[in-house]
Image (cartoon, rainbow, N blue to C red):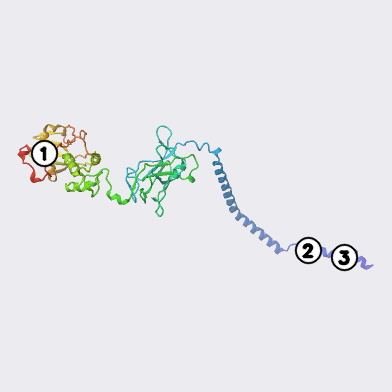
Protein backbone atom coordinates (compact mmCIF):
# COMPACT_ATOMS: atom_id res chain seq x y z
CA UNK A 1 0.00 0.00 0.00
CA UNK A 2 2.90 2.28 0.64
CA UNK A 3 4.07 1.87 -2.91
CA UNK A 4 0.73 2.86 -4.38
CA UNK A 5 0.60 6.06 -2.34
CA UNK A 6 4.00 6.92 -3.67
CA UNK A 7 2.80 6.85 -7.25
CA UNK A 8 -0.27 8.93 -6.49
CA UNK A 9 1.46 11.69 -4.56
CA UNK A 10 1.75 14.96 -6.45
CA UNK A 11 5.43 15.34 -5.62
CA UNK A 12 6.32 11.87 -6.79
CA UNK A 13 9.15 11.12 -9.27
CA UNK A 14 6.70 10.82 -12.20
CA UNK A 15 6.70 14.61 -12.57
CA UNK A 16 10.50 14.94 -12.70
CA UNK A 17 10.98 14.19 -16.44
CA UNK A 18 8.67 17.11 -17.49
CA UNK A 19 10.57 19.50 -15.23
CA UNK A 20 13.84 18.43 -16.80
CA UNK A 21 12.45 19.01 -20.32
CA UNK A 22 11.34 22.52 -19.38
CA UNK A 23 14.77 23.32 -18.01
CA UNK A 24 16.46 22.05 -21.19
CA UNK A 25 14.27 24.35 -23.38
CA UNK A 26 15.42 27.52 -21.63
CA UNK A 27 18.27 29.18 -23.64
CA UNK A 28 21.55 29.76 -22.01
CA UNK A 29 23.07 33.20 -21.62
CA UNK A 30 25.74 32.45 -24.26
CA UNK A 31 23.17 31.41 -26.85
CA UNK A 32 21.22 34.58 -26.22
CA UNK A 33 24.33 36.71 -26.82
CA UNK A 34 25.17 34.76 -30.01
CA UNK A 35 21.72 35.21 -31.42
CA UNK A 36 21.83 38.94 -30.69
CA UNK A 37 25.15 39.32 -32.49
CA UNK A 38 23.85 37.34 -35.47
CA UNK A 39 20.73 39.49 -35.77
CA UNK A 40 22.78 42.68 -35.62
CA UNK A 41 25.15 41.45 -38.36
CA UNK A 42 22.26 40.48 -40.62
CA UNK A 43 20.69 43.90 -40.17
CA UNK A 44 23.95 45.63 -41.11
CA UNK A 45 24.32 43.39 -44.14
CA UNK A 46 20.83 44.27 -45.33
CA UNK A 47 21.51 47.97 -44.87
CA UNK A 48 24.67 47.67 -46.96
CA UNK A 49 22.93 45.62 -49.64
CA UNK A 50 19.92 47.93 -50.04
CA UNK A 51 21.57 50.72 -52.17
CA UNK A 52 23.02 48.22 -54.58
CA UNK A 53 19.68 46.49 -54.97
CA UNK A 54 17.95 49.83 -55.56
CA UNK A 55 20.48 50.78 -58.25
CA UNK A 56 20.13 47.46 -60.07
CA UNK A 57 16.34 47.70 -60.00
CA UNK A 58 16.39 51.29 -61.30
CA UNK A 59 18.70 50.37 -64.19
CA UNK A 60 16.53 47.47 -65.20
CA UNK A 61 13.38 49.58 -65.08
CA UNK A 62 14.97 52.37 -67.16
CA UNK A 63 16.23 49.86 -69.75
CA UNK A 64 12.81 48.30 -70.14
CA UNK A 65 11.16 51.70 -70.40
CA UNK A 66 13.65 52.80 -73.08
CA UNK A 67 13.00 49.67 -75.11
CA UNK A 68 9.29 50.21 -74.81
CA UNK A 69 9.65 53.83 -75.96
CA UNK A 70 11.74 52.82 -78.99
CA UNK A 71 9.18 50.22 -79.99
CA UNK A 72 6.44 52.82 -79.72
CA UNK A 73 8.32 55.33 -81.90
CA UNK A 74 8.84 52.64 -84.52
CA UNK A 75 5.13 52.11 -84.67
CA UNK A 76 3.77 53.68 -87.94
CA UNK A 77 0.70 55.02 -86.17
CA UNK A 78 2.89 57.05 -83.81
CA UNK A 79 5.30 58.38 -86.47
CA UNK A 80 2.84 60.45 -88.45
CA UNK A 81 4.09 63.69 -86.93
CA UNK A 82 7.79 62.87 -87.45
CA UNK A 83 7.20 62.12 -91.15
CA UNK A 84 6.09 65.68 -91.76
CA UNK A 85 8.80 67.88 -93.42
CA UNK A 86 11.07 69.59 -90.91
CA UNK A 87 12.28 73.15 -91.32
CA UNK A 88 15.50 72.55 -89.36
CA UNK A 89 18.69 72.07 -91.36
CA UNK A 90 22.41 72.01 -90.73
CA UNK A 91 24.50 74.33 -92.90
CA UNK A 92 28.15 75.08 -93.52
CA UNK A 93 28.61 78.79 -92.82
CA UNK A 94 30.75 79.46 -95.93
CA UNK A 95 31.94 77.72 -99.07
CA UNK A 96 35.21 75.84 -99.05
CA UNK A 97 38.50 77.30 -100.23
CA UNK A 98 39.48 75.51 -103.44
CA UNK A 99 41.45 73.68 -104.68
CA UNK A 100 41.84 71.08 -101.95
CA UNK A 101 44.92 68.86 -101.67
CA UNK A 102 45.54 65.75 -99.62
CA UNK A 103 47.31 66.51 -96.36
CA UNK A 104 46.27 70.18 -96.44
CA UNK A 105 43.89 71.73 -93.92
CA UNK A 106 40.33 72.21 -95.16
CA UNK A 107 39.31 75.84 -94.65
CA UNK A 108 36.60 78.21 -95.89
CA UNK A 109 36.92 81.12 -98.30
CA UNK A 110 38.33 83.31 -95.53
CA UNK A 111 41.01 80.67 -94.75
CA UNK A 112 39.25 80.05 -91.43
CA UNK A 113 38.23 76.68 -89.93
CA UNK A 114 34.86 75.36 -91.07
CA UNK A 115 31.73 76.10 -89.04
CA UNK A 116 28.34 74.40 -88.93
CA UNK A 117 25.17 76.36 -88.20
CA UNK A 118 21.59 75.30 -87.47
CA UNK A 119 19.05 77.11 -89.63
CA UNK A 120 15.30 77.34 -89.92
CA UNK A 121 14.22 77.18 -93.57
CA UNK A 122 10.69 78.42 -93.04
CA UNK A 123 9.96 81.60 -94.97
CA UNK A 124 11.90 83.23 -97.77
CA UNK A 125 15.19 83.38 -95.92
CA UNK A 126 17.10 80.91 -93.78
CA UNK A 127 17.22 82.11 -90.18
CA UNK A 128 19.76 80.92 -87.62
CA UNK A 129 18.22 79.09 -84.69
CA UNK A 130 19.25 76.84 -81.81
CA UNK A 131 18.07 73.94 -79.69
CA UNK A 132 17.61 74.03 -75.89
CA UNK A 133 20.20 71.29 -75.45
CA UNK A 134 23.47 70.38 -77.22
CA UNK A 135 23.59 67.65 -79.87
CA UNK A 136 26.43 65.74 -81.51
CA UNK A 137 27.34 66.39 -85.16
CA UNK A 138 29.40 64.06 -87.33
CA UNK A 139 31.38 65.20 -90.41
CA UNK A 140 31.44 62.69 -93.29
CA UNK A 141 32.53 62.46 -96.94
CA UNK A 142 29.85 62.15 -99.65
CA UNK A 143 29.95 61.19 -103.30
CA UNK A 144 30.15 64.24 -105.57
CA UNK A 145 27.09 63.08 -107.55
CA UNK A 146 24.83 63.30 -104.49
CA UNK A 147 22.30 64.78 -104.47
CA UNK A 148 21.06 64.84 -108.05
CA UNK A 149 19.89 68.13 -109.44
CA UNK A 150 16.29 66.97 -109.54
CA UNK A 151 16.32 65.71 -105.96
CA UNK A 152 17.14 68.34 -103.35
CA UNK A 153 14.92 66.78 -100.68
CA UNK A 154 16.87 63.66 -99.80
CA UNK A 155 16.03 61.33 -96.95
CA UNK A 156 18.37 60.30 -94.16
CA UNK A 157 18.64 56.85 -95.73
CA UNK A 158 19.72 58.36 -99.08
CA UNK A 159 22.25 60.56 -97.32
CA UNK A 160 23.74 57.64 -95.39
CA UNK A 161 23.90 55.42 -98.48
CA UNK A 162 26.07 58.00 -100.30
CA UNK A 163 28.72 58.29 -97.58
CA UNK A 164 32.13 57.40 -99.03
CA UNK A 165 34.51 55.28 -97.00
CA UNK A 166 38.23 54.84 -97.49
CA UNK A 167 39.67 52.47 -100.05
CA UNK A 168 40.70 49.02 -98.89
CA UNK A 169 44.04 49.15 -97.14
CA UNK A 170 43.98 52.96 -96.86
CA UNK A 171 43.71 55.26 -93.88
CA UNK A 172 40.32 56.81 -93.00
CA UNK A 173 39.36 59.24 -95.75
CA UNK A 174 39.08 62.18 -93.35
CA UNK A 175 41.72 62.74 -90.69
CA UNK A 176 41.55 65.08 -87.72
CA UNK A 177 40.44 65.28 -84.15
CA UNK A 178 37.22 67.20 -84.88
CA UNK A 179 35.18 64.80 -87.01
CA UNK A 180 32.57 64.69 -84.23
CA UNK A 181 31.65 68.04 -82.70
CA UNK A 182 28.99 69.41 -80.37
CA UNK A 183 26.38 71.87 -81.62
CA UNK A 184 25.61 74.42 -78.89
CA UNK A 185 23.44 77.51 -79.32
CA UNK A 186 23.07 76.67 -83.02
CA UNK A 187 26.83 76.77 -83.70
CA UNK A 188 29.55 74.13 -84.00
CA UNK A 189 33.17 74.97 -84.94
CA UNK A 190 35.15 72.31 -86.77
CA UNK A 191 38.85 72.12 -86.07
CA UNK A 192 41.64 70.96 -88.36
CA UNK A 193 40.58 68.20 -90.75
CA UNK A 194 42.20 67.00 -93.96
CA UNK A 195 41.79 64.41 -96.70
CA UNK A 196 44.17 61.46 -96.80
CA UNK A 197 43.27 60.34 -100.34
CA UNK A 198 42.40 62.03 -103.61
CA UNK A 199 39.03 61.81 -105.34
CA UNK A 200 40.18 60.29 -108.64
CA UNK A 201 39.01 56.77 -107.73
CA UNK A 202 35.29 57.54 -107.35
CA UNK A 203 33.03 57.60 -110.40
CA UNK A 204 32.24 61.30 -110.17
CA UNK A 205 35.89 62.21 -109.48
CA UNK A 206 34.56 64.56 -106.81
CA UNK A 207 33.72 64.60 -103.12
CA UNK A 208 31.40 66.61 -100.94
CA UNK A 209 31.60 67.21 -97.21
CA UNK A 210 28.48 66.43 -95.22
CA UNK A 211 27.35 66.88 -91.63
CA UNK A 212 24.66 64.85 -89.88
CA UNK A 213 23.21 64.56 -86.39
CA UNK A 214 24.40 61.57 -84.36
CA UNK A 215 21.12 59.67 -83.75
CA UNK A 216 21.92 58.76 -80.15
CA UNK A 217 22.24 62.42 -79.18
CA UNK A 218 18.86 63.62 -80.44
CA UNK A 219 15.33 62.19 -80.46
CA UNK A 220 13.31 65.13 -81.84
CA UNK A 221 12.07 66.00 -85.33
CA UNK A 222 14.48 65.38 -88.17
CA UNK A 223 17.28 67.87 -88.72
CA UNK A 224 18.25 67.86 -92.38
CA UNK A 225 21.89 67.18 -93.15
CA UNK A 226 24.35 69.78 -94.46
CA UNK A 227 26.36 69.34 -97.65
CA UNK A 228 28.98 71.42 -99.45
CA UNK A 229 29.45 71.96 -103.15
CA UNK A 230 31.20 69.18 -105.08
CA UNK A 231 34.98 69.53 -105.38
CA UNK A 232 38.05 67.68 -106.58
CA UNK A 233 40.66 66.54 -104.07
CA UNK A 234 44.11 66.52 -105.67
CA UNK A 235 47.21 64.74 -104.54
CA UNK A 236 49.48 66.95 -102.42
CA UNK A 237 52.19 66.76 -105.08
CA UNK A 238 49.93 68.91 -107.26
CA UNK A 239 50.11 71.71 -104.69
CA UNK A 240 53.58 72.52 -105.99
CA UNK A 241 51.94 73.51 -109.28
CA UNK A 242 48.99 75.31 -107.68
CA UNK A 243 47.63 78.43 -109.39
CA UNK A 244 47.36 81.52 -107.22
CA UNK A 245 44.06 83.36 -106.91
CA UNK A 246 44.69 86.20 -107.14
CA UNK A 247 48.26 86.07 -108.49
CA UNK A 248 50.97 88.35 -107.18
CA UNK A 249 53.15 90.53 -109.37
CA UNK A 250 56.27 88.55 -108.51
CA UNK A 251 54.64 85.13 -108.97
CA UNK A 252 56.25 83.05 -111.68
CA UNK A 253 54.32 83.29 -114.90
CA UNK A 254 53.27 79.62 -114.82
CA UNK A 255 51.07 80.46 -111.83
CA UNK A 256 48.62 81.90 -114.37
CA UNK A 257 45.80 79.75 -115.72
CA UNK A 258 46.53 77.77 -118.92
CA UNK A 259 50.30 78.17 -118.49
CA UNK A 260 51.79 74.97 -117.13
CA UNK A 261 55.07 74.79 -115.30
CA UNK A 262 57.86 73.82 -117.74
CA UNK A 263 55.22 73.54 -120.45
CA UNK A 264 55.38 74.92 -123.99
CA UNK A 265 53.92 78.32 -123.09
CA UNK A 266 56.19 78.66 -120.07
CA UNK A 267 59.29 77.95 -122.16
CA UNK A 268 58.26 80.40 -124.89
CA UNK A 269 57.66 83.17 -122.36
CA UNK A 270 60.96 82.45 -120.58
CA UNK A 271 62.80 82.66 -123.92
CA UNK A 272 61.26 86.13 -124.40
CA UNK A 273 62.43 87.16 -120.90
CA UNK A 274 58.92 87.13 -119.46
CA UNK A 275 59.47 85.41 -116.13
CA UNK A 276 56.78 86.67 -113.76
CA UNK A 277 53.23 87.98 -113.76
CA UNK A 278 54.42 91.59 -113.81
CA UNK A 279 56.44 90.97 -116.98
CA UNK A 280 53.38 89.33 -118.56
CA UNK A 281 51.07 92.22 -117.66
CA UNK A 282 53.50 94.93 -118.77
CA UNK A 283 53.79 93.43 -122.23
CA UNK A 284 50.02 92.87 -122.41
CA UNK A 285 49.58 96.63 -121.84
CA UNK A 286 52.36 97.88 -124.11
CA UNK A 287 52.12 95.35 -126.94
CA UNK A 288 49.43 92.65 -126.62
CA UNK A 289 49.97 91.54 -130.23
CA UNK A 290 53.60 90.71 -129.51
CA UNK A 291 52.56 88.70 -126.43
CA UNK A 292 50.13 86.68 -128.53
CA UNK A 293 52.87 86.00 -131.07
CA UNK A 294 55.18 84.72 -128.32
CA UNK A 295 52.54 82.28 -127.08
CA UNK A 296 51.86 81.10 -130.63
CA UNK A 297 48.90 79.38 -132.23
CA UNK A 298 48.84 76.72 -129.52
CA UNK A 299 47.00 79.15 -127.26
CA UNK A 300 43.46 79.52 -128.56
CA UNK A 301 41.44 82.68 -128.22
CA UNK A 302 39.44 81.11 -125.39
CA UNK A 303 42.59 80.09 -123.50
CA UNK A 304 44.01 83.58 -124.00
CA UNK A 305 40.90 85.16 -122.48
CA UNK A 306 41.14 82.86 -119.45
CA UNK A 307 44.83 83.63 -118.94
CA UNK A 308 44.56 87.39 -119.33
CA UNK A 309 41.45 87.52 -117.14
CA UNK A 310 43.30 85.66 -114.38
CA UNK A 311 46.32 87.93 -114.72
CA UNK A 312 44.17 91.04 -114.43
CA UNK A 313 42.97 90.02 -110.97
CA UNK A 314 46.49 90.73 -109.70
CA UNK A 315 46.87 93.21 -106.84
CA UNK A 316 49.00 96.06 -108.18
CA UNK A 317 50.13 97.29 -104.76
CA UNK A 318 51.08 100.89 -104.04
CA UNK A 319 54.32 101.33 -105.98
CA UNK A 320 54.64 103.80 -108.85
CA UNK A 321 57.44 104.28 -111.34
CA UNK A 322 58.53 107.69 -112.65
CA UNK A 323 59.90 108.17 -116.16
CA UNK A 324 61.63 111.52 -116.61
CA UNK A 325 62.68 113.52 -119.64
CA UNK A 326 63.72 117.18 -119.74
CA UNK A 327 60.29 118.33 -120.85
CA UNK A 328 58.07 115.65 -119.31
CA UNK A 329 57.51 113.44 -116.28
CA UNK A 330 55.25 110.37 -116.56
CA UNK A 331 54.14 108.23 -113.64
CA UNK A 332 53.31 104.57 -114.30
CA UNK A 333 51.73 101.87 -112.20
CA UNK A 334 53.63 98.54 -111.85
CA UNK A 335 52.37 97.20 -115.20
CA UNK A 336 53.27 100.21 -117.36
CA UNK A 337 49.88 101.88 -117.34
CA UNK A 338 50.04 105.67 -117.23
CA UNK A 339 48.71 107.14 -114.01
CA UNK A 340 49.69 110.77 -114.54
CA UNK A 341 51.79 112.88 -116.88
CA UNK A 342 53.31 116.37 -116.79
CA UNK A 343 54.36 117.59 -120.25
CA UNK A 344 55.85 121.04 -120.84
CA UNK A 345 54.60 122.09 -117.42
CA UNK A 346 51.01 120.97 -118.12
CA UNK A 347 49.40 118.20 -116.06
CA UNK A 348 47.40 115.50 -117.83
CA UNK A 349 45.30 112.60 -116.74
CA UNK A 350 45.21 109.48 -118.88
CA UNK A 351 41.88 110.45 -120.47
CA UNK A 352 43.43 113.72 -121.67
CA UNK A 353 46.41 112.07 -123.34
CA UNK A 354 44.94 110.62 -126.58
CA UNK A 355 45.37 114.03 -128.22
CA UNK A 356 49.12 113.33 -128.04
CA UNK A 357 48.87 109.62 -128.87
CA UNK A 358 51.90 109.22 -131.11
CA UNK A 359 54.18 111.15 -128.81
CA UNK A 360 52.91 109.36 -125.67
CA UNK A 361 53.20 105.91 -127.23
CA UNK A 362 56.83 106.61 -128.01
CA UNK A 363 57.46 107.65 -124.40
CA UNK A 364 55.72 104.51 -123.13
CA UNK A 365 57.95 102.32 -125.30
CA UNK A 366 60.99 104.08 -123.92
CA UNK A 367 59.77 103.60 -120.35
CA UNK A 368 59.10 99.91 -120.99
CA UNK A 369 62.64 99.29 -122.24
CA UNK A 370 64.22 101.38 -119.48
CA UNK A 371 61.96 99.96 -116.76
CA UNK A 372 64.74 98.79 -114.44
CA UNK A 373 66.22 102.30 -114.33
CA UNK A 374 62.96 104.16 -113.54
CA UNK A 375 62.58 105.94 -110.24
CA UNK A 376 60.43 103.92 -107.86
CA UNK A 377 58.12 105.73 -105.44
CA UNK A 378 55.41 104.65 -103.02
CA UNK A 379 52.04 106.08 -103.97
CA UNK A 380 48.48 105.30 -103.09
CA UNK A 381 47.56 101.64 -103.01
CA UNK A 382 45.42 100.56 -105.90
CA UNK A 383 43.56 98.07 -103.71
CA UNK A 384 41.69 96.87 -106.82
CA UNK A 385 42.34 94.37 -109.59
CA UNK A 386 44.04 95.36 -112.83
CA UNK A 387 42.18 98.14 -114.60
CA UNK A 388 40.47 97.75 -117.92
CA UNK A 389 39.62 100.51 -120.36
CA UNK A 390 37.16 102.98 -118.85
CA UNK A 391 37.34 101.82 -115.21
CA UNK A 392 37.72 104.54 -112.59
CA UNK A 393 40.44 104.69 -109.96
CA UNK A 394 41.16 106.94 -107.02
CA UNK A 395 42.41 110.41 -107.74
CA UNK A 396 46.12 110.78 -108.01
CA UNK A 397 47.41 112.42 -104.81
CA UNK A 398 48.58 115.71 -106.31
CA UNK A 399 45.36 117.66 -105.60
CA UNK A 400 44.43 117.70 -109.29
CA UNK A 401 40.68 117.17 -109.39
CA UNK A 402 40.86 114.77 -112.29
CA UNK A 403 39.65 111.21 -112.60
CA UNK A 404 42.42 108.95 -113.77
CA UNK A 405 41.63 106.11 -116.13
CA UNK A 406 43.78 103.26 -117.32
CA UNK A 407 45.91 103.85 -120.36
CA UNK A 408 44.68 102.08 -123.46
CA UNK A 409 47.10 99.36 -124.66
CA UNK A 410 48.97 100.28 -127.81
CA UNK A 411 47.33 99.06 -130.97
CA UNK A 412 50.42 97.96 -132.84
CA UNK A 413 53.58 96.03 -132.16
CA UNK A 414 56.77 97.72 -131.05
CA UNK A 415 58.72 94.52 -131.65
CA UNK A 416 58.01 93.89 -135.34
CA UNK A 417 61.74 93.38 -135.97
CA UNK A 418 62.63 91.37 -132.90
CA UNK A 419 62.96 92.14 -129.21
CA UNK A 420 63.88 95.71 -128.40
CA UNK A 421 67.39 96.25 -127.13
CA UNK A 422 68.89 99.43 -125.81
CA UNK A 423 71.29 99.68 -128.74
CA UNK A 424 68.46 99.52 -131.29
CA UNK A 425 66.42 102.39 -129.86
CA UNK A 426 65.79 105.31 -132.26
CA UNK A 427 67.39 108.64 -131.52
CA UNK A 428 65.57 111.49 -129.83
CA UNK A 429 65.00 113.22 -133.15
CA UNK A 430 63.53 110.08 -134.64
CA UNK A 431 61.17 109.75 -131.67
CA UNK A 432 59.66 113.10 -132.48
CA UNK A 433 60.59 115.17 -129.46
CA UNK A 434 63.49 117.31 -128.31
CA UNK A 435 64.59 119.10 -125.25
248 left or right, relative to 14:
left
Q: Residue furthest right?
A: 1
Image quadrant assignment for residue 148: top left
SS at circle 3? loop
136 left or right, relative to 271:
right
The disc at residue 12 is 3
Label 3 vs label 1: CA separation?
160 Å
The C terminus, quarter of image: top left
Label 1 vs label 2: CA separation?
142 Å
Q: Earlier in the sequence, mark 3 or mark 1?
A: 3
Image quadrant assignment for residue 318: top left
SS at circle 2? helix
Crowd rating for badge 1 (residues with CA inside 10 Å; few <14, some 14–19, many 20+)? many
Q: Earlier in the sequence, mark 1 or mark 2?
A: 2
Q: Position of residue 162 (x, y in %)?
A: 43, 44
Which residue sits at x=18%, y=48%?
270
Q: Earlier in the sequence, mark 3 or mark 2?
A: 3
The disc at residue 23 is 2
The one nearer the camera, 306 or 116, is 306
Residue behind mark 1: 363
433 left or right, relative to 272:
left
Q: Position of residue 309 (x, y in %)?
A: 24, 39
Q: Nearer the viewer, mark 3 or mark 1?
A: 1
Which residue sits at x=57%, y=44%?
68
Camera sees residue 232 = yes
Crowd rating for badge 2 (residues with CA inside 10 Å; few <14, some 14–19, many 20+)? few
Crowd rating for badge 3 (residues with CA inside 10 Å; few <14, some 14–19, many 20+)? few
Which residue sits at x=10%, y=38%?
362
Camera sees residue 282 = no
Amino acid sequence: MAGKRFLEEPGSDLDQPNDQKRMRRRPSFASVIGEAVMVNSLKNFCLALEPMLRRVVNEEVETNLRRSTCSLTRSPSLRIQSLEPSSLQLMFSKNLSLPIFTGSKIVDLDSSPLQILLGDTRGDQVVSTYLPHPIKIEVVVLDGDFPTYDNRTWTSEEFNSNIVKERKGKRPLLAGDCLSVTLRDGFAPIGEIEFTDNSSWVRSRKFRLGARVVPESYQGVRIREAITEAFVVKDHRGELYKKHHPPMLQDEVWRLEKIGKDGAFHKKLAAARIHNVQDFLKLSVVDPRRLREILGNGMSEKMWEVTIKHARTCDLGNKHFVFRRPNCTITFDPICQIVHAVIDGNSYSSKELPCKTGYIETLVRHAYVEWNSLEEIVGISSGIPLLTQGELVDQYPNHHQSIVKSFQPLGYSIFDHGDVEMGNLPSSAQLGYNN
